[in-house]
Image (cartoon, rainbow, N blue to C red):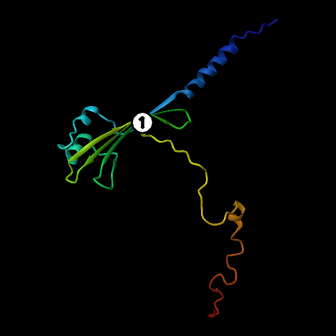
């Protein structure tokens, strides 16, 4: 009489668990500028200009359009599991302000505390006017094309 051995079933179950484990691995990503602390510390207010900052740090991530035209360098490290939205773990925002002559006025550095999580209140865009259903949108124009008084006549009689 054959005896049932649970060993193959246990091994198969462990194999399936091992195959599913990599799906839960945390993903890491880096976005933006790679900040070198020594290069950032070499920028001196009142000494460096736009040209020397660009030669030292490279092109900024963002440039201000108003006022003195601040330069902003962004760096962010994020983590997420599989299909979930990434969450910022570390962020550095380096803002370099210039005076009207193009000389560095100040250097401000902020971190991940400036990251805001925004969740939309609704999944529809508010519009002005009446609300229509899908069927009204699909079939609402039936009968309006070519209706009397809707446009010029095409009977080639020369009259109105």
Name above or below for residue 124 compared with residue 159: above
Which residue is at 20% across, 46% downward? 49
Would you say 43 lies left or right of 144 here?
A: left
Report x, y in % for residue 63.
Answer: 32, 50
The quarter of the rendered structure image containing the C terminus is: bottom right
> The residue tagged with tag 1: helix, strand or loop?
helix
Q: Nearer the viewer, residue 38 or 8?
A: 38
Name above or below for residue 140 compared with residue 55: below
Q: Nearer the viewer, residue 101 or 62?
A: 101
Q: Quadrant of residue 125?
A: bottom right
Which residue is at 23% across, 46% downward? 105
Crowding at mark 1 (Cα within 10 Å: few <14, some 14-19, many 20+): some
Report x, y in % for residue 50.
Answer: 22, 48
The quarter of the rendered structure image containing the N terminus is: top right
Q: Which residue is mark 1?
A: 112
Which residue is at 27% across, 53% downward? 68
Would you say 108 lies left or right of 7 here?
A: left
Name above or below for residue 150 compared with residue 79: below
Report x, y in % for residue 40.
Answer: 26, 36
Report x, y in % for residue 132.
Answer: 68, 63
Identify the residue at the far left of this view.
47
- Count the marks: 1
Q: Quadrant of residue 138?
A: bottom right
Which residue is at 33% across, 36% downward? 34
């Amino acid at each position: 009489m054959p005896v049932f051995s649970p060993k193959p079933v246990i091994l198969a179950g462990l194999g399936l668990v091992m195959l599913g484990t990599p799906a839960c691995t945390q993903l890491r990503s880096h976005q933006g500028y790679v900040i070198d602390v020594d290069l950032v510390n070499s920028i001196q207010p009142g000494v460096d200009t736009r040209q020397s900052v660009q030669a030292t740090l490279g092109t900024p991530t963002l440039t201000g359009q108003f006022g003195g035209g601040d330069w902003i360098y962004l760096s962010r490290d994020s983590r997420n599991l599989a299909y979930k939205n990434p969450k910022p773990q570390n962020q550095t925002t380096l803002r370099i302000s210039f005076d009207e002559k193009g000389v560095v006025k100040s250097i401000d550095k902020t971190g991940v505390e400036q990251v805001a999580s925004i969740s939309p209140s609704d999944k529809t865009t508010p519009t002005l006017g009446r609300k229509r259903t899908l069927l009204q949108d699909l079939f609402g124009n039936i009968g309006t094309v070519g209706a009397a008084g809707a446009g010029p006549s095409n009977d080639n009689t020369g009259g109105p």
